[in-house]
Image (cartoon, grey):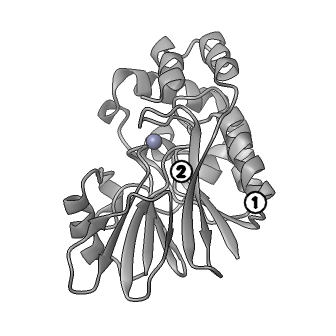
Amino acid sequence: MRIGVFADVHANLEALEAVLGILRQQGVTHFACCGDIVGYGPDPGRCCDIICQLRCPVVAGNHDYGVLGRTRVADFNPDAAAALRWTREQLTEDRLLLLDGLPLTTVRKPLLLVHGSPSAPEQWEYIFTVREAEEEMRHFSEDICIVGHTHYPFAVAKPAGQPAQLIRAQSFQLAPGVKYLVNAGSVGQPRDGDPRACGLVLDTTNRTITFFRVPYDVARVQRKIIAAGLPESLAARLAVGR
Ligand code: ZN
């Protein structure tokens, strides 16, 4: 079975469609989403509908709860907060209920899905370093935890009784007795300097994880952001992936 895992769509319809297109081309039949469907981008409703139609496990991100007031809007930077207020006005009651129903974590063996950190999913902490990833690995028992939130793809492996290590390969084999903490990167607002949409494929038969990047029509999304009256910085950053 091939599972397409993605995170941080951030209401970027063009990026989401590009990701789902490439995943289906690659024979992916199952999906999982690590949160932040909405926030920043111009198509929150359509992105909610498409992800809902996938009927896949989805966890909540801080922006998904932020729209509902379940995370204080004051905790977001001014551009993010402005986008959250705008997003709330765009979403129908059905879509708000969908976001409200998202759990903080979900397990679909062999995966644990969480947006921020497994140790405190409700606190939206960021995992940036191998040391932070290693500490987080003490807080889950599944073989693989996939997170989002930082918008930086990475993978860290920890063989039993040994220190955790960063995996530098774009594709890698899952070894028995090794625990993994993986960030799926961001579909709709990458911040690692590569503006292409990001995600990964878990192949449970071959036991591999493979990251992918896919280009999409950034200029079109930028025009929509400006036309919606969202902060212009949210459009500009998409072109550079920062
Ligand atoms: Zn995010």
Q: Is mark 1 within 8 Å of ligand 1?
A: no
Q: Nearer the viewer, mark 2 or mark 1?
A: 1
Q: Relative to 11, say whether 30 is above or below.
A: below
- The residue type indicated by label 2 comes to Ala
Secondary element under disc 2, as helix, strand or loop, is loop
Residue 92 visible? The answer is: no
- In this picture, residue 70 sits left or right of residue 239: left
In the foreground, 117 or 152: 152
In the rendered image, which quarter contains the C terminus? top left
Residue 229 x/y as whole percent: 58, 12
Q: Is mark 2 within 8 Å of ligand 1?
A: yes
Quadrant in the picture for residue 162: bottom left
Residue 75 x/y as whole percent: 30, 35
In the rendered image, which quarter contains the N terminus? bottom right
Q: Residue at x 62, y 18 (%)?
A: 222
**Residue marked by disc 1:** 26
